[in-house]
Image (tube, rainbow, N blue to C red):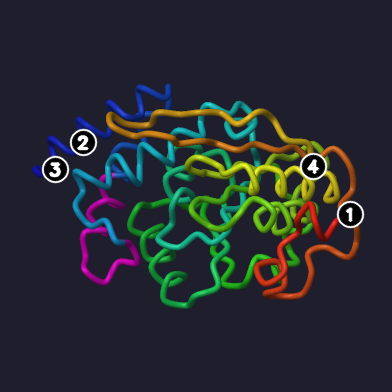
Amino acid sequence: MKRSRLLERIEARLAAQDADLAATHPLATLLELLEAPAAPTSVHDPAVGLDVHVADSLSALEIPDLRRAGLIADLGAGAGLPGLVLAAALTDARVVMVESHNRKCAFIRDAAAAMELPNVEVACVRAEEWKDGAGACDVVTARALASLPVIYEYAAPLLREGGTVIAWKGEVAQDESANGAAAATLLGLEEDPPRAVRPFAGSERRTLVVARKIAPTPAAYPRRAGIATKRPLSVKNLR
């Protein structure tokens, strides 16, 4: 795709979310970087990535808390999605990309530099071990990361009271929903009703799950690295 056409399509996606059009060129740069075979994504075509990477990431701008955030932590940042997209659109926010794999951390650092995003930082560490963020984040994001109980256990200790976790999900199964609700209650979170989104033509069953921190998280959480995924919180083990 010619860059001029790519820029036009990015502008349209930004306009659809009432986002700053100044993000157009940085986002084009990101899509071009993701074309490289070594980029840590399975989607390399910018025409496809415009939807599944950029438009999907921008869909969270429907959550007012995100637009107001001063500190955003993107957990399991991978190829920098949604964090780099949000950093381009929300230039007044500080965005910390939390990722434990060195190769992905290096890609995010290089991409942020190429996109000229001074508001991006990389914490190359597991989410459970990122102590600098404890109790400090306005918003924690997680896209294609884990089940809701795991996301909540990672996110809740990082949020200030009144902060928000936003999880990009497909259709959430009944068991995951019930276990997520139980984990949220334990961890001091209160869930909103799931929000269905249609970030691009043909997208189906896309959901943003939003929960707010309304009470302190017990000091025992998060548990040590790896335990949240091995023994996720559930209705059964919280009885």
Q: Are marks 4 and 3 in contact (CB under 8 Å)?
A: no
Task: Residue at 76% x, 75% y: name it.
Answer: 224
Q: Which quadrant holds the N terminus?
A: top left
> What is the number of the mark on residue 3?
3
Up/down of 221 relative to 210, above or below: below
Q: Position of residue 194 (x, y in %)?
A: 60, 31
Specify whether residue 5 is painted magenta.
no
Viewer-closest of 61 and 150: 150
From the image, tell me which residue sits under label 2.
Answer: 7
Q: Is residue 134 above or below residue 2?
A: below
The residue under label 4 is 189
Q: CA distance from mark 2 to mark 3?
A: 6 Å
Secondary structure of the residue carrying tag 3 is helix
Of labels 2 and 1, the one closer to you: 1
Q: Quadrant of residue 17?
A: top left
Which one is earlier in the sequence, the residue at label 4 or at label 3? 3
Q: Which residues are magenta?
A: 28-41
Looking at the image, do the residues carrying marks 2 and 3 touch, with CB atoms under 8 Å apart? yes
Q: Secondary structure at mark 1?
A: loop
How would you rate the neighbour count of disc 1 (Cα within 10 Å): few for under 14, some for 14-19, many for 20 or more?
few
The amino acid sitting under disc 2 is Leu
